[in-house]
Amino acid sequence: RAARTVSLHWFRKGLRLHDNPALLEACEGATHVYPVFILDPHFAKPDVIGVLRYRFMLQTIKNLDDNLREIGSRLFVVKGQPAEALPRLFREWGVTKLTFESDTEPYAKVRDRHVCELAAEHQVHVQIFPSHTLHDPEAYVARLQGKDVPTVYQSFVKLFASMGPVAPVAPTVDAKRLPSPAPEYLSGRDRKKADQGNGHAGGEKIEEDRTRSDDFSVPGLSGIGYPETDAPTLYPGGERAALARMQEHLANVKYIVTFEKPKTSPNALRPSTTVLSPYLKHGALSSRLFYHSLCSTLAQHKGPHTQPPVSLVGQLLWREFFYLQGHATPNFDKMVGNPICRQIPWGKDAELLGAWEEARTGYPFIDACMTQLREEGWIHHLARHALACFLTRGDLWQSWEEGARVFEKYLLDADWSVNTGNWLWLSASAFFHQYFRVYSPVAFGAKTDKEGEYIRKYLPVLRKMPSKYIYEPWKAPKGVQETAGCVVGRDYPHPVVDHATVSKQLMGKMKAAYDANKEGGAKGEEKSGEKKR
Ligand code: FAD
């Protein structure tokens, strides 16, 4: 170890002080720790990452900065390419150690390899920790000893069980553990906290006006080229909100022990599942903390409780399952060159894709789901099912890659591994093969919301449509449409396709594609067919 350790901890995901082993390592033996977040232009593209997710991310790093200041440190927010920004910071601060959490997404793998080379050139020692998932995806691969990664959930659950216990949650980084950055980067108030944390009574007295004025603060949306938005914040970003939301759910023991995903409603007006996904995606909440908290709640309960795949632990295992797939499968986010993906001759129709993305398919349930997604950034799992099935094999025959791109843009929780994996599933391209099980854009929503309250909320144009026609307004007599103030073709579109006809035709096309794939063959054929999700 260098005599004088100056650490730079690079936050990417893992935006938290709890269960952050890489940040703890940064603290180890260091005189100064610089917590850094880099605003990489690769991600700052409004067409690729929508404004709601970017706002969520900025709220998350703002909360991280606040939490660091509470313990006498701060966040250094830097704009630029990591490969340019980091060497500059290494030199400026005399960094000897770089720590970060590993990331299995393709862009991150290339970026991190390059950064490690640059660190070596600057004699900076790098330490990387896997803490985004319950186990390191690479550890599953090692455990498989050359065997294929399981593409069936139940086989994955066996693999998970064979891995031994999930690592305990690492201690939260606090003022005692975290050495502060050089004092000139702290305001007088923060410096005082740093001195207290380091056990100094008053510390060296540095006047406020000697504080280094810097450009390391958390910017607003416009500061990075995004439009401002006045969309309400339903799910505020940050570790504090994440922990509060998790605790709120854990306090409801009945909810935890009886949770059965397929029985939760896609069109409830208040979310019927936890909405912890945006926090887990950004690592504002540790999946290990959530997992251990769930396990101890279940253990204390003593009575019966639901099990994977439908329980909450089961949901975390789905996440784990898709992370492993994403890590181990070449070209995971593409059809071509992806060994587990069926080759299906999807159409390419900008009109149909546009109608779906802009919530004007003429199917109120589908358009309401899409509107909720675009306006609020989160929709229920089964609403995602309905949208994904409709775009691909169910109705529009458009590529799942296009659908994944749209979800990537609008979801607060957009997560490369999980989003891709679920699109592969819903389009029956991999994992799930019962392509003849198609969601009806009319009957499916009506099962849990007969009166169409969800549609009325998200599509106000249909607010006055009688319940009898709320899922199929084109069937309402003209007079009824007039009275409801919603004439189909004038105020709300006609259906873009006729579901009954088209879904049958598309099943035939799926069968043909499946038959053609039998020769070439996608890897990982599933015999049993998994239903319950
Ligand atoms: P809960 O039911 O409360 O589950 C708790 C946690 O388990 C979630 O926060 C999530 O981290 C994990 N989880 C739950 N379901 C799944 C699942 N099917 N696969 C993997 N992990 C799961 N989830 C994302 O996090 N990011 C995505 O980009 C994403 N894209 C999806 C795209 C499609 C087409 C579909 C069908 C599903 C997608 N999901 C995605 C999975 C799932 O819909 C969401 O994780 C879930 O709805 C989030 O809400 P929640 O936090 O209330 O979930």
Image: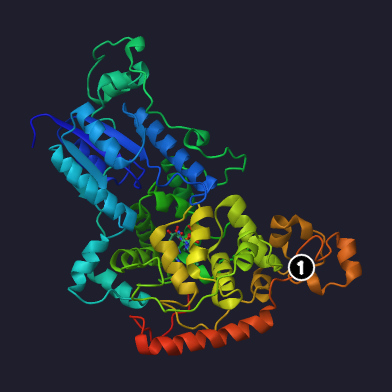
Residue 55, relative to residue 146: is it above or below?
Answer: above
Tell me residue 434's x, y (percent).
Answer: 49, 83
Left or right of residue 450: residue 289: left
Q: Tag 1: residue type?
A: Ile
Tell me residue 400's x, y (percent).
Answer: 49, 69
Tell me residue 471's x, y (percent).
Answer: 73, 70
The one nearer the camera, 532 or 222, is 222
Which residue lies at the image location 22% right of the left edge and 27% below the top edge?
Answer: 93
Which residue lies at the image location 35% right of the left edge and 12% below the top edge?
Answer: 208
The one nearer the camera, 293 or 304, is 293
Q: Is residue 526 visible?
A: yes
Give the number of callouts: 1
Q: Quadrant of residue 172?
A: top left
Find numbered disc 1 in the image and state the secondary structure of the residue it sits on: loop
Residue identified by numbered label 1: 470
Which residue lies at the image location 35% right of the left edge and 32% below the top edge?
Answer: 75
Q: Is residue 411 visible?
A: no
